[in-house]
Structures are given as structure tokens and as C-alpha cells.
Image: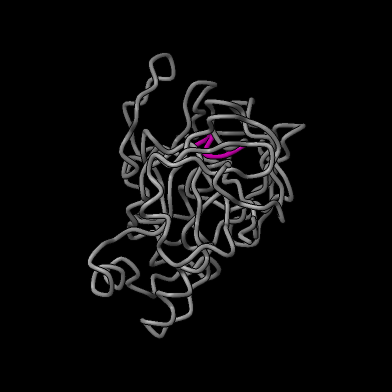
Amino acid sequence: MSSVAALYRHPVKGFTPEPLTEAVLPTGGWFPGDRMWAVENGPSGYDPSAPEQIPKQRFTVLMRQAILARVRTRWDEAANVLTAGIDGEHFSVRLDDPDDRAVFEARLTAFLGEEAQGPLKLIAAGPDHRFMDSSRGRVSILNLNSVRDLERRWGQTLDPLRFRANVWVEGWSPWVENNRVGEAIKIGETTLRGAKPIVRCAATEVDPETGERDLAVVRALFETYGHMLCGLYVSIEEGGRIAVGDPVARPA
């Protein structure tokens, strides 16, 4: 029996994953609390009144700025306050306060140094958008047995956090997710539908603890399997509650 091993949200794109025990997924929407904010690295062209998919290279992201992994953030949903730790200094950011956001932007600019390529600006996605890497990405699923298969063949240990997924699944056969496009997947009260396999980028090269770029995961995927896939984007066809431990199955 396959089941949910872990749930994560990433309130600010590129920053700290936050574990959850449960979540309520909205029909047609996104994983709650995920990629709601992003930090522009120079003007991105994003227009909140007409949101469109923006290349991730226009934001501060791990594929470009590996040391972001050393910044620790935590979002208080009820208060809409982000707690940030940068170089051992901790402070709170009221996300609806422009002055607080400006303080965060200034401290992050100093931390990134030359890797801050343009003015940094913390921006909100709005209700009809999320800063996902794909326009078809609503929820991301990681098959833990696929990660283990790569570990075994490559001879390296991989923290699943490198893949920054929302739902970790235990019990699927390795790489079965690559063939689940268009298929329904039942988790808890929800019905999800496979949208597209996730093509991996250099963000997976970064150790999520140290911020060091230490493993060529994308190259290992290609050399081992002839593809650069690991994970599955799904849409939320029927919303509802999901929780760690819930069975994962194709609906009858």
C-alpha cells in the first residue's frame, strides 16, 4: 500500500521548506501556502494584475544562488509574518508592510553580495497565481523509491528535500510517476490528476543544509536513465483534506 510520507510547503519561492501534518487542497487551485511569494532579482516583468508564468531565473532561486539554503524562513499564516534568519540574525517581516519587506530585501541583498544581480524585491503572487516553475504545476509529488533507486545506482545519498516537493509518496515502484500523466490519483479526500513529469534543474545540486553545490544530480539522472525527470506535477481535480499517512491510490 502506497501512502503519504511527508507534506511540505514553500511559502517563499527558493527558501525554506516547511513540514506539515495535513493540508486542505482547493479544487482547481494550488497546494496551500506554497510559492505565494518570490524575490525578484532585478525587475522580472511580473504583473500581478495580469499574472503569467515568469522564468525562475528572474528570481532568487537555488539554481542560481545556492547560498539561499543558508537563509532560514518560517511563515506564520495567521499573522502573515515571515520570520527570517540570515547569518545568525533573526527578525520578523510583516508581509503586508512595505517597510518590513524593504528591511528583508536590504538584509538579503547584503547577504547575497555579488549574487544579487539587481534590486531585490519581495513580491506576492496574488490569489490567481503561484510562482511555480511550470504553468501546469499545481502540486508536486516526489516518489521516494525513485530517489532511492538513483541513490543505489549512483552511489550517493540524496536528501529528498533537494527536490522541493509538496507530497512525498512511499510505496510506489521506482519511476512509475513518469507514466502517470493524465491518470487520476486518490489521496485522502482529494482526487489529483497527473499533469507532467518534473524536469529537474541545478537547484537539486545544492545541499539543503549547507548551501553548498555538491552533487551533479541532473547529470546523474541523464547519465543513469537518459532523462532529467524526478517527480510529478498534478492538478487538483477534487479538493479536500490530505494528511501524512493517507493511502495513495488510483480511484476505483
Query: Which quadrant: the N terminus?
Result: bottom right
Q: Indicate the colouring scheme.
A: one colour
The quarter of the image holding the C terminus is: top right
Q: Nearer the viewer, residue 224 or 122?
A: 224
Identity of the residue furthest to the top in this view: 49
Q: Is residue 235 left or right of residue 153?
A: right
* Number of numbered discs overlaid on the protein picture: 0
232 and 191: which one is in front? 191
Instruction: Tell me if residue 210 comes above or below residue 50 in the rendering.
Output: below
Of helix, strand and loop, which mostly describes the magenta segment?
loop
Q: Position of residue 42 (x, y in %)?
A: 34, 37
The residue lying at 22 percent from left, 67 percent from top is 226
Q: Is residue 184 magenta?
A: no
Rendered residue at 31%/26% (across/down): 45
The percent coordinates of residue 20 (x first, y second) are: 70, 50
User: Left or right: 8 with respect to 163?
Assistant: right
Figure check: 227 above or below 182: below
Horizontal side, residue 67 vs residue 220: left or right: right
Give x and y (percent) for residue 240: 68, 33
Instruction: Write the residue at 43% across / 44% down.
Output: 233
Tell me where residue 171 sits by quadrant. Answer: bottom right
| 36 part of magenta stretch | yes
Q: Residue furthest front?
A: 252
Q: Which stretch did the figure color magenta?
A: 33-38
Q: Is residue 123 left or right of residue 198?
A: right
Q: Residue furthest bottom?
A: 155
Residue 7, image x, y percentages? 64, 52
